[in-house]
Amino acid sequence: MSELKHTVEARLTREWQQRGPVAWALTPLACVFGMIAAARRAAFSLGWLKSVRIDVPVVVVGNVTVGGTGKTPTVIALVEGLREAGFTPGVVSRGYGARVNTPTPVTATSAASVGGDEPLLIARRTGAPVYVCPDRVAAAQALRAAHREVDVIVSDDGLQHYRLERDAELVVFDHRLGGNGFLLPAGPLREPLSRHRDATLINSPYERTLPPWPNTFALELAPGDAWHLDNPKLRRPLSHFSGERVLAAAGIGAPERFFATVRAAGITPQTRALPDHYAYSANPFTDIDVDTILITEKDAVKLGSWHDARIWVVPVEAALDHRLIALVVEKVRGRSPA
């Protein structure tokens, strides 16, 4: 069933980049989706549905498109940027695939199956308090109750979670931008491209001309030295794998971005795209005859019940424009903690 879902998602992703027969056939459903989404936004705007304000500023990092765009490395970099500006940030997330119904802390030693792969990666990389819950308001309140030192909360995703009142919104796109410009299911958009936000980040190794949207910044993602899964102290520059038989594998929203990063280091890899949030309950690489397997950090946090000495992990660092950090800091400082 998961393979069928992956196949359908891959087909839709291709269709969403063009206004072909499939997209046009789905436009009536997109109109219905758009009306429901607009009614929901209006209900919160008019106060018919209540938003909840947390006692510290909230910054949401999200997207208006379906699929991965680079939100997690953006959240990690934003946490570090806020720290450098003198803040003590915490992070809340839904925790995709997490088996939780109540606010749950995620630490560096948590299991990915409990809190989700992305919150676990954020906790390990930043050391910041991280709480997950489908109700992000409850997650934020629990985080503040347990960590009174936290004076700003970053929400990993949750742009459409209007119950959580926010002070700044950052929307992340990759090279696909808004695709064909249609709402779901005719296109990839959860909300119109014209949706208000405080800043837009474009994560793309291909797109050099940024769209003329207000407060638009390039999001630079650069790979660090790969580290060996069995011995994380063992590190090698990515380019040092160029003479080996390499498989690049990724269970992320846009695996081709990872493959492009590997190729840019002078490697000609075999590639294997796995479903986003792939569980890795068993080794999917037993049938592959290669010297080295390169995976993402998001994949690495889910490995542990089986062993494969060929696996190396490629970390990715996001570099945020100092003007973007200044914009967020201005928004945050404009709302002092209660």
Image: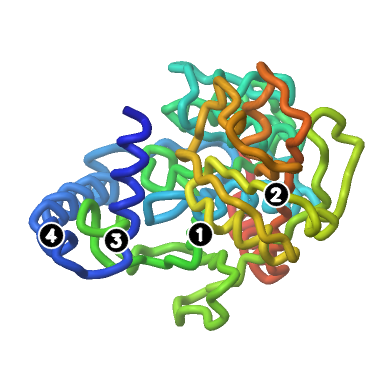
Q: Which amino acid type is shown beneath numbered disc 1?
A: Val
Mark 1 — residue? Answer: 172
Viewer-proximal residue among 317 and 256: 256
Q: Is residue 205 left or right of residue 36?
A: right
Question: Which badge, 2 or 1, comes first in the chain's sequence?
Answer: 1
For the C terminus, the quadrant is top right
* Label 2: which secondary element: strand
Mark 3 highlights which residue?
Answer: 16
In the image shown, does 7 or 44 lie closer to the viewer? 7
Alpha carbons under labels 4 and 2: distance apart = 42 Å
Sequence order check, earlier mark of 2 and 3: 3
* Contact check, label 2 and label 1, Cβ < 8 Å: no
Nearer mark to the viewer, of 2 and 3: 2
Residue at mark 3 to residue at mark 4: CA–CA distance: 12 Å
Q: CA distance from mark 1 to mark 3?
A: 18 Å
Amino acid at dot 3: Trp
In the rendered structure, the answer to whether residue 217 lies left or right of residue 9 reads right
Looking at the rendering, which quadrant does residue 208 occupy?
A: bottom right
Q: From where the camera sits, is residue 329 visible?
A: no
Q: Taking 217 as reference, is 43 left or right?
A: left
Tag 3 secondary structure: loop
Q: CA distance from mark 2 to mark 3?
A: 31 Å
Given this view, does label 1 or label 3 mark the residue nearer the observer? 3
In front: label 2 or label 1: 2
Residue under label 2: 246
Q: Among all residues in the image, which is located at the extreme right?
A: 233
Residue displayed at 61% across by 62% down: 260
Name the amino acid, label 4: Thr
Q: Earlier in the sequence, mark 4 or mark 2?
A: 4
